[in-house]
Each structure stands twice: as C-alpha cells, then as structure tokens.
Amino acid sequence: MADHGDHDAVRRSYDTVAGEYATRLHAELDAKPLDRALLSSLAERAPRGAPIADLGCGPGHVAAHLAGHGARAVGVDLSAGMLAEGRRRYPQVEFRQGDLLALPAEDGEFGAAVALYTIIHLAPGELLPAFHEAHRVLRPAGLLLVSFHIGTETRHLDEWWGHDVNLDFRFLPVQEVTALLEQAGFTLEMRLERAPVPAEAQTHRAYVLAHRA
C-alpha cells in the first residue's frame, strides 16, 4: 500500500490482539441476522464452485460462515496472527496473507468477495486502488459486498482489550464509497444502512453490494 508504515502498524496491532479478538468475536454473527442474510444471499448468487474471498478476514469466522453455505471460502488478511487463529479454528477455509492493494490472487479468480469493516483502515487515497484490486480478482459480474462505519471522523486506538495497539478506524460517507466503487468499474446493486446492535460498537453502519461490470 502507499504508506507501508501505516500498514505495518495495522499488521502489528492485529497480531497483538488476534487471540483475544478471535475469542471474543468468533460468534458475533449469531447476533447479526441481517449480516447473515446478506452473506447467505451473496453465497447463493455466486457461481457454483467459484471461490468466494473474505478480504480482511481476521480470524476467519465470516469465511467459515460462507463455507457453511457450501462456498469454497478464501480468507485474506494482513495479519499473520489472525490467519493463525483462522487456520486453527476453521480448517475448511483456505487462508492467504496479503494486502488489499496487492491481493494474493489471480485475475478473475473469485466469483464473489466480501470486505466487512476492512476498508476502514485504509487512507483516503487508498480506497480507489483497493476497489480496483477487488475488481481485478473478481470474475465478470462477480459480486462485492462492502461494509463500513458511516461518518467522517477517525477514531484512534492506543489500547484495545488491555493490549498496546496503533490503529485508526476511519468512518466513511456512503456517497463517497459508492462513487469510488463506480469509478473502479463496479455497478451498484444495493446500499443499506442500519443502527448498531447492542453487543457491537455503537456506530451506524452501511452495506454496499455491487457487481463487476
């Protein structure tokens, strides 16, 4: 990515909290019926047999959910610690280490992809290159589901669950994200906003579904 120092900080931070993150959040989808419905719809629409990528997969619980719907799921993450948690917990998922701006995948490899709360760690100038890279690894008409926190603020964490970290969480305007997706060659299908559920950070969230034109 453009600023490797920032990405090194993200990698180190998630390596540091990987075990705690996996323990606390491995079952988070149980309390998120809307997320489960969107993931199920994406898995149903993806071409049969085509792998589905979980970009910024963390410890792999979303990829495992997709695999539970019969998908061949591939989790991609910057953090080796997160990937180790995923491989230990979800042997049915393939995991690869990689960056959103240089995905470890062939052109047109995936039938669909999800990027849930992962673009929030990108600098503003990295969003369009990341969407171009997602476009590259998707098949024609391949689906991309993106979620993020809505707004314009940046929240910084120096400590997370008792661990020292160095993380920025960037909130994003919905219109900006949709415009960049279209600029990268995607056609928008759906955008949805929701309030937080009690067990998660109290932010409003957006989901955008698009397909590769």
Image (cartoon, rainbow, N blue to C red):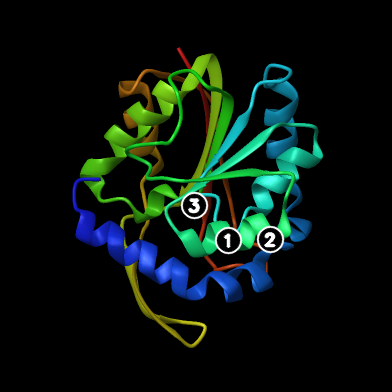
Q: In front here: 175 or 51?
A: 51
Which residue sits furthest bottom? 162
Q: Nearer the viewer, mark 1 or mark 3?
A: 1
Q: Which is more toward the observer, 67 or 148?
A: 67
**On the image, numbered disc 2 is attached to which residue?**
88
Number of residues whose C-alpha sits closer than 10 Å to that of mark 3, classed few (under 14), some (14–19) or many (20 or more): many
Local packing at callout 1 (Cα closer than 10 Å; few below 14, some 14-19, many 20+) is some
Residue tagged 3 = 117
* Marker disc for residue 84: 1
How far across and down, in percent of the image, does residue 74 sit?
60, 38
Tell me what residue is drawn at x 63 percent, y 57 percent: 86
Amino acid at pointer 2:
Arg
* Badge 2 density bin: few <14, some 14–19, many ≥20, Cα 10 Å: few
Q: Residue at x 71, y 30 (%)?
A: 43
Tell me, yes or no, whether the two marked residues, 1 and 3, touch with CB atoms within 8 Å: no
Q: Is residue 199 in view from this perspective?
A: no
Above or below 76: residue 142: above
Alpha-carbon span between mark 2 and mark 3: 22 Å
Closer to the camera, 201 or 144?
Answer: 144
x, y percentage for residue 195? 59, 57
The quadrant the C terminus occupies is top left
Check contact, mark 1 vs mark 2: CB within 8 A: yes
As displayed, is residue 189 above or below residue 125?
above
Q: Residue 148's x, y, as percent?
A: 47, 49
Instruction: Check disc 2 and report its element: helix, strand or loop.
Output: helix
Name the mark on residue 38. Answer: none
Q: Amino acid at mark 3?
A: Tyr
In space, the residues marked 1 and 3 are separated at their CA atoms by 20 Å
Q: Mark 2 or 3 closer to N-term?
A: 2
Residue 9 in sight in this render: yes
Q: CA distance from mark 1 to mark 2?
A: 6 Å
Which amino acid, by three-letter code, is at mark 1?
Answer: Ala
